Image: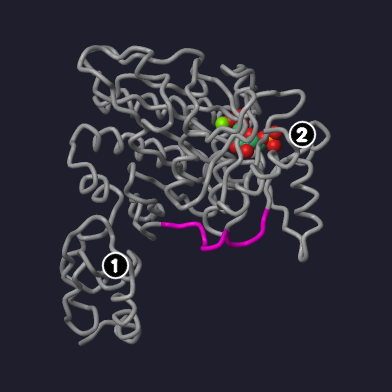
Amino acid sequence: MFSRFSRSARPVAQRLAARPVLNFTYAASAAGFAGAATLAYQQNVRPTSCEVMLAKGDSVNITEFPTLQRYILAQTGDQELAALLMGITLACKATSRACAKAGIANLFGLAGEVNSTGDDQKKLDVLSNDLFIDALVNSGAAAVLVSEENDEPIFVEKKKAGRFIIAFDPLDGSSNIDCNVSTGTIFAVYEKKGTGPATMDDVLRTGNDIIVAGYCMYGAATELVITFKGKGVHRFTLDPSLGEFMHIESDVKIPAGGGKKIYSANEGNYMNWDKAIVSCMEQYKNAKPPYAARYVGSMVSDVHRTILYGGIYLYPADKKSKNGKLRVLYEGFPMSMIVEQAGGAASCGLFKGKIQRLLDIVPTSIHERCPVIIGCKRDVEHVINEYKKQGLA
Ligand code: AHM
Ligand code: MG
């Protein structure tokens, strides 16, 4: 009579009580779970979605999965913001599908254009950008779109315009596209300041004004990580058979104490870095045991690993690129917000004469760049202290 999952039901049930609270609530009646027990998927009980799915496998009602869609609706209580985030989710799924089929569909290679920041556009850069623009404009919730792939911001025509400004990199990690290594989408959402038409004043604001930030990683699995301001970081994995992002972890935190000792940077730029960064690199290598080096070359993957395992990711300024490589609005800001909410830190290091917290920057143009030093507090603070020791700050 009991399900094939009932063997594992007791330890699962015991584990539930120890879990932190999930921020959205709905009750799931789990008939096949621990022999017709009711699983209270609410306030003080947080099963993983996997456990709920197992429980629901034998239950009558299979509509109570903890999907991203439900999480968004529960978090926002705002239909327009929910519509916007559904648009982003849809474009992430379509991009995931395009990445998975790229070889078959002849989507590898260059599109033959150069983007706003001078990079050669790949076919998948262009396709994913089109997917995001279409989904966002037609969500009816967007006022302005800022994309890495467009020179100018897109002001949505009045009849389709909504309240939100979205800055996004539709497919970050372009150099990894053609060799089937993880890429990702990064996005940040702001709300218009006033009720009239959006202006550039709504777009060029500090990272502290972001209301939602996230990234979607197209890797071995497609995973979307999202944070609503002040509401912690949540992980969702795309279940391809359902076409839904399923919740897998609440309130994600960088491991206590900073976690694994890993540094992640393109060391090919070593000779051009400033003394403080070079000194940190030397210290990572001379530590006992030494730090491990890990660098995918896709910011989403490198930051995702940093959040889950610990350590530090750096794309510092160098002699040739005084502002670094990464873009403030759709790379630096959203990733910094996520890392800070996961208990980490995000800095530019020494930038324009002073040590700056990344989210405090006030951008003056949409494709502006900044150095990015991001990860656990242990390692980011160490870099900042190194600047002070070197007398550079
Ligand atoms: P992109 O937006 O053109 O893909 O560039 C951003 C990417 C990041 O994902 C990654 O961390 C970095 O550039 C890698 O740069 P490099 O190849 O110089 O190491
Ligand atoms: Mg990018």
Where ligand 1 lies, by quadrant?
Answer: top right
**Which numbered marker is on residue 207?**
none
Image height check: is 74 above or below 62?
above
Q: Residue furthest right?
A: 271
- Residue at 54 percent across and 28 percent down: it is 125
Q: Position of residue 93 (x, y in %)?
A: 40, 42
Query: Which span is picked out in magenta?
Result: 252-262
For the residue pair 296 and 18, the one nearer the viewer reads as 18
Q: Is residue 16 magenta?
A: no
Q: Main SS type for the magenta part?
A: loop
The residue that disc 1 covers is 46
Q: Is mark 2 within 8 Å of ligand 1?
A: no
* Tag 1 near tag 2, CB within 8 Å: no
The residue that disc 2 covers is 273
Image height check: is 229 above or below 238?
above
First in residue order: circle 1 vs circle 2: 1
| Quadrant housing the N terminus | bottom left
Q: How many numbered marks are there? A: 2
